[in-house]
């Protein structure tokens, strides 16, 4: 999804095992709310994750839907994961398929890709809900200019397992000794978790940099209660216990090895080089990116 400017998230300094708690700002995109968590002023990244958006939940009446026109990316991988609804993905490699709840779209931009995200002609005929998370993962320095690629992993291929008092779905990377069913060049973990009412989950320090995003329910970390849509970024070096409230907790867990150097972000471009971003801006303005088959007519202009 295309990056759109929004108000900066609010960061609340914390103590002990929590480095900072980020409360995102909500932006209404015409009946569709997006909560931007990363990047934030006090924390730009967690492991390789440089962008974290919570989409919805939103209900669309018949005739209305998502219409994100073709736009470019470089230097990152986008990860789309839905709880409810459907988004039709098309890209300049010729990929065209819907993403549905529990599945993963992992799109490697590398040296450049263009994609669009829309509501299909069939879906737009009826009322429907949309709810999910979209993240960007910065590619390692040695892979920033890799060839673009796209991988779709159906929901029934993702590992789902019990850990402590939680059911976890491994979206990408490796955690608790289990690997996701597809390889990446990024050292990360990314999971959806549902912790039982009153239950707990130990998040080990060996995972690297770690953050916990509370989608819904109640959660306490080191006696600090989180509000739904808060992200707690954890301190390194010690295991951390996540304790669910009586209603249970729906969480997203993400992180991994620290980035191998700073990254610059402009619009949908991520790179270790400012000059590379300037080149991408010029390439988009001059029409040198590839078109999206089946979606060639529209595009999002470079922001002024």
Image: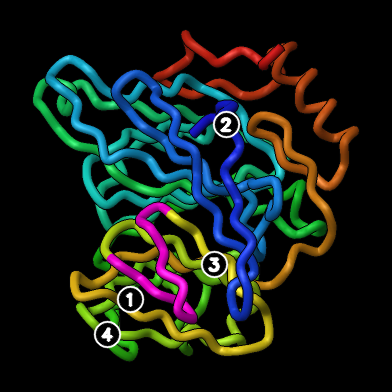
Q: Residue at x 61, y 87 (%)?
A: 206
- What residue did someone put label 3 on? 211
Secondary structure under tag 3 reads strand
From mark 4 to mark 3, how far is it between C-alphas? 19 Å
Q: Residues within 10 Å of mark 2 (few under 14, many from 20)?
A: few
Q: Residue at x 64, y 61 (%)?
A: 13
Secondary structure under tag 4 reads loop
Q: Quadrant of the C terminus?
A: top right
Q: Position of residue 43 (x, y in %)?
A: 68, 55
| Left or right for 228, reference 224 | left
From mark 4 to mark 2, how far is it between C-alphas? 35 Å
From mark 2 to mark 1, how far is it between C-alphas? 32 Å
| Circles 2, 1 touching at the beta carbon (< 8 Å) | no
Q: Can residue 107 be seen in this snapshot? A: no
Q: Which residues are magenta?
A: 218-229
Residue 7 is tagged as: 2
Residue 227 falls within the magenta-colored stretch:
yes
Q: Position of residue 259 (x, y in %)?
A: 75, 63
Q: Can residue 55 be seen in this snapshot? A: yes
- What residue did someone put label 4 on? 199
Secondary structure under tag 1 reads strand
Q: Earlier in the sequence, mark 1 or mark 4?
A: 1
Q: Position of residue 261 (x, y in %)?
A: 84, 59
Q: Earlier in the sequence, mark 2 or mark 1?
A: 2
Q: Is residue 65 above or below residue 138?
A: above
Q: Earlier in the sequence, mark 4 or mark 3?
A: 4
- What residue did someone put label 1 on? 168
Residue 52 is tagged as: none
| Left or right for 206, reference 217 | right
């Amino acid at each position: 999804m295309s990056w759109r400017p929004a108000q900066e998230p609010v960061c609340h300094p914390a103590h002990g095992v929590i480095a900072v708690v980020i409360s995102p700002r909500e932006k209404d995109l015409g009946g569709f709310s997006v909560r931007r968590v990363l990047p934030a002023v006090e924390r730009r990244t967690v492991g390789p994750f440089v962008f974290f958006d919570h989409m919805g939940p939103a209900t669309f009446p018949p005739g209305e839907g998502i219409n994100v026109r073709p736009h470019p990316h470089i230097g990152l991988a986008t990860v789309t994961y839905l709880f409810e609804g459907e988004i039709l993905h098309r890209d300049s490699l010729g990929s065209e398929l819907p993403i549905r709840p529990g599945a993963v779209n992992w799109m490697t931009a590398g040296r450049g890709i263009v994609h669009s995200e829309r509501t299909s002609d069939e879906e737009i005929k009826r009322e429907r809900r949309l709810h999910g998370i979209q993240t960007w993962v910065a590619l390692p320095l040695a892979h920033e200019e890799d060839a673009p690629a796209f991988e779709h992993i159906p929901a029934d291929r993702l590992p789902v397992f019990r850990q402590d008092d939680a059911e976890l779905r491994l979206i990408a990377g490796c955690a608790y000794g289990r690997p996701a069913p597809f390889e990446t060049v990024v050292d990360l973990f990314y999971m959806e978790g549902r912790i039982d009412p009153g239950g707990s989950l130990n998040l080990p320090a060996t995972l690297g940099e770690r953050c916990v995003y509370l989608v819904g329910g109640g959660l306490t970390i080191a006696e600090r209660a989180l509000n739904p849509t808060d992200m707690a970024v954890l301190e390194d070096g010690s295991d951390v216990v996540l304790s669910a409230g009586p209603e249970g907790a729906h969480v997203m867990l993400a992180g991994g090895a620290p980035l191998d150097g700073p990254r610059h972000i402009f619009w949908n471009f991520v790179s270790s080089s400012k000059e590379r971003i300037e080149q991408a801006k010029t390439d988009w303005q001059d029409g040198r990116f590839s078109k999206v088959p089946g979606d060639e007519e529209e595009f999002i202009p470079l922001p002024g």
